[in-house]
Image: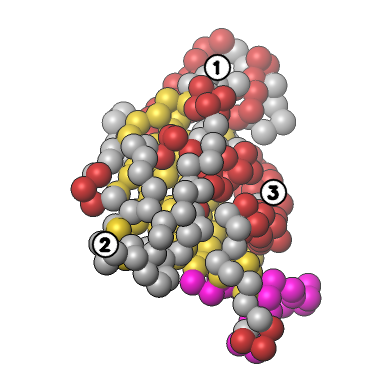
Amino acid sequence: MNRLSNKLALYGFNNLTKSLSFNIYDVCITETAEDQARYIEYIDEMYNSKRLTEILVQVTENIGANILNISKQDYEPQGASVTILISEEQVPLHAIDESCNKGIHTPIPETVVAHLDKSHITVHSYPESHPEMGISTFRVDIDVSTCGEISPLKSLDYLIESFDSDIITIDFRVRGFTRLANGKKVFVDDKFNTIQDFINKDTLEKYNAIDVNIYQENIFHTKMMLKELDYDNYTLDKDFSSYSEEKQEQLKNQLINEMHEIYYGKNIYET
């Protein structure tokens, strides 16, 4: 899909601000404190600041932007953050602030930030568990804010593929306005009805998806939840079939209840 390729005849610079908020949830069965610790260890290994930086650098390339600066940080006891400052056009070396690392950094610093000349990308991770509920969750929040012609919507398929996503929530908003050569204001430079237009059809087939859009405000919201669950993917390295039938049913209900509450954003089931 190449929905964002049509050029506008503008008077000056395209100063529309396009903001994408991309959030994923991964859910796992962790019945014991040891299971919870192993899950956190797995998440910290899979989605540390180095890996998250690699994902964001690829997002920057996918949307056609240029990196000015990268900052990253791993946290104790868990979690990581990355920020990238980016620009639509390549910035001459003499014009880049000397504090920017242009995406090149030594492995010594524990913190990295990346900047675009008109835009930025950030990611934060949030592992979470309850000591008695037997379920752990992992949330990743990615925000991509761009100005000009580049659009963060081009990165959606790659972002979905980069994470084990049981539940996905996506928000997109266009702010400000730019002007055509004849002086007419433009409040959105691409007409579309849903964020789902920018997601691969094969991917959408795997999820239940709901839209809540406010077209007059250029606000778009889509949330997605996996249709079919392979329960072996939710038990760390344990075979789901090794549980008794009664235990399997209990664990299935726990997983489904947890996912439904996250998806609908409210407490539905009694604890």
Query: How far across and down, in percent of the image, does residue 263 sit?
Result: 38, 35
Name the residue: 53% across, 26% down: 201
Which residue was labeled with disc 3? 46
Of the residues under marks 1 and 2, which one precedes in the sequence?
2
Name the residue: 57% across, 40% down: 157
Marks 3 and 2, how far apart at CA: 45 Å
- When the figure is inspected, residue 246 is found, relative to residue 152, above or below; the finding is above
Query: How far across and down, in percent of the image, does residue 252 sit?
Result: 50, 21
Quarter of the figure with residue 179: bottom left
Looking at the picture, which amino acid does disc 1 mark? Gln
Residue lying farthest to the left in this orientation: 216
Marks 3 and 1, how far apart at CA: 27 Å
Report the span colored magenta. Answer: 97-118
Q: Is residue 163 left or right of residue 142?
A: right
The kind of secondary structure element at disc 1 is helix
Q: Is residue 21 left or right of residue 46?
A: left
Which residue was labeled with disc 2? 185
Tell me if residue 135 is in the magenta stretch: no
Of the residues under marks 3 and 2, which one precedes in the sequence?
3
Of the residues under marks 3 and 1, which one precedes in the sequence?
3
- When the figure is inspected, residue 52 is found, relative to residue 111, above or below; the finding is above
Looking at the picture, which amino acid does disc 2 mark? Lys
Tell me if residue 109 is in the magenta stretch: yes
Query: How far across and down, in percent of the image, does residue 218 sit?
Result: 29, 50
Which residue was labeled with disc 1? 248
Q: Nearer the viewer, mark 1 or mark 2?
A: 2
Q: Residues within 10 Å of mark 2 (few under 14, many from 20)?
A: some
**Do residues under tags 3 and 1 come within 8 Å of each other at their CB atoms?**
no
Marks 1 and 2, how far apart at CA: 58 Å
The answer to whether any part of residue 129 appears in the image is: no
